[in-house]
Amino acid sequence: MKRRFLGSVVVAALLMAGCGSDSDESVDNTTAVAHLGTMLPYSVLDNTIENGAKPGTNMEVRNGGFGSAAFKDLKNKNRFYALTDRGPNASYTDENNVSGKMFPIPSYTPRVGLFEIQTDGSVVKISQILFKDREGNEISGLPNPVGLGGTSEIPFDRNGNRITDAQGNDLTDIYGLDSEGLVVLQDGSFWVSDEYGPHMVHFDADGKEIDRINPFSDDTRASINLPAEFAKRWANRGMEGLAITPDEKMLVGIMQSSLDNPKTRKDLTRIVAVNLETKVIKQYLYRQDANANSNSEITALDNDTFLVIERNGKFYEKDSTAMKKIYKIKLSSGTELESVSLDASMAQDATIGLTIDGKTLETISAEENSWETLEAKGIVPVTKILAVDMIAEVGYPHDKMEGIVLFNDATLGILNDDDFATWITNNTLEQKYLDTAQTKEDANTLYIVRDLKLK
């Protein structure tokens, strides 16, 4: 296995808000980050739940969770932002065979943390910002109402009881967010993408919502509507990655997996580009290496060139077919779907998008020789070139590779989502482990890959 030299020690530290720093901005501290990764600090949110994997002991629900996306600090080369998702959660089915998500801490607020790499290669947390609605109230990760991003997902508490409002209805949050993509602008504000709605939400530097983009024409909060087909996202596999071009004019989001347009679970996925000035929207196709893979992140190298994380959900120590790769793509290499030339068999449908002989692109993707069929109509996906294979680099042990920090043109930081160290097996909560023997607990870890030729 090829391994590139990445640095020195692995350090774990307890999270302390506003902790100190020994970083020298004139020195590139990424060179000191451990070869096999440096753990991010975390605090314990809860330690009262029995660990289902090891009865008689309790698990830790950790904060942690800063790995859904990442972005460099534009003012300090040793600092980066990292994003949590909706909070600790796990798939659950109750005794009545009703399925949904268990939320051990349903009041958890999605947030972004600012971290700094120290001279010894360790990482400290400098601060965090909790996301808020337009009135300044902290939001949650609970499901949206149907029609505004919801998928009729049922929320359960840690005891398996449905979480309800005062009227006995399943509790929803119109501002609830499963945050998965992050960009930071020069003015200190954030754009965040969500994998349920999907939504693109603009927060100010204090975390208060100021704008949003989504496919729901009835949502009066949205200044721009995405094409309606994006509302047909595969639930929990919506807009997983988000990028901003260097001129800060265009947001680019990538869907984690295929749309349910209809449900196919194949290798055709979509990229959407939104011009924030003109409000013009463009679409491109991304072809995955395998059906139902996950596109977990996208980040811009220039106005046309991007890096994309593509992975499966396997742990390398449990399954040697684990795949964790980063590809370089150019949008201009693919067909722009909104402006493609239409022949007599093609149409742009307001609900399901571009069709050929009345069939959606997702329908065609399930047919034999699907990509050849599309190419015959002048439709090709973006080309992709392998930039990094993290299994080859470090034997990447985590299931989720979700954050990229572009420190410079030759150096990448890569983060995993540790799911707040929370897992569930047979409807029972347990600690999240990397190995079959359950001796290695998952944790947010920063990896550094250098000496790349990204441009």
Image (cartoon, rainbow, N blue to C red):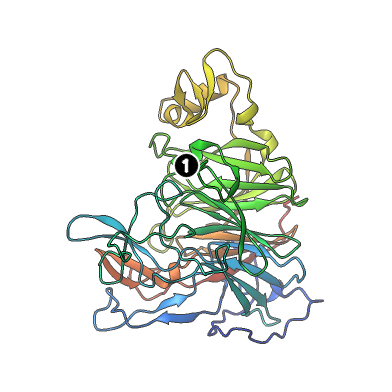
Instruction: Residue under label 1, please give it.
Output: 231
Q: Residue shown at 52%/64% (left/top)?
A: 416
Is there any visible trace of residue 144 in the rendered image?
Answer: yes
Q: Residue shown at 25%/64% (left/top)?
A: 427
Position of residue 389 relative to residue 382, above or below, is: below
Q: Quadrant of residue 91?
A: bottom left
Q: Nearer the viewer, residue 43 or 322?
A: 43
Q: Mark 1: which secondary structure?
A: helix
Q: Quadrant of the N terminus?
A: bottom right
Left or right, residue 325 beside residue 333: left
Is there any visible trace of residue 297 in the rendered image?
Answer: no
Local packing at callout 1 (Cα closer than 10 Å; few below 14, some 14-19, many 20+) is many
| Residue lying furthest right | 26
Q: Quadrant of residue 130?
A: bottom right
Counting from the top left corner in percent of width and height, residue 64 is at 49, 74
Q: Quadrant of residue 60?
A: bottom left
Q: Nearer the viewer, residue 379 or 236?
A: 236
Q: How many marks?
A: 1
| Residue lying furthest front | 167
Counting from the top left corner in percent of width and height, residue 200 is at 58, 52
Position of residue 315 relative to residue 369, above or below, is: below
Position of residue 95 relative to residue 159, above or below, is: above
Counting from the top left corner in percent of width and height, residue 45 is at 43, 79
Query: Callout 1, which amino acid?
Result: Ala
Q: Residue shown at 50%/66% (left/top)?
A: 139
Q: Residue shown at 54%/65% (left/top)?
A: 67
Left or right, residue 64 beside residue 448: left
| Residue lying furthest top | 344
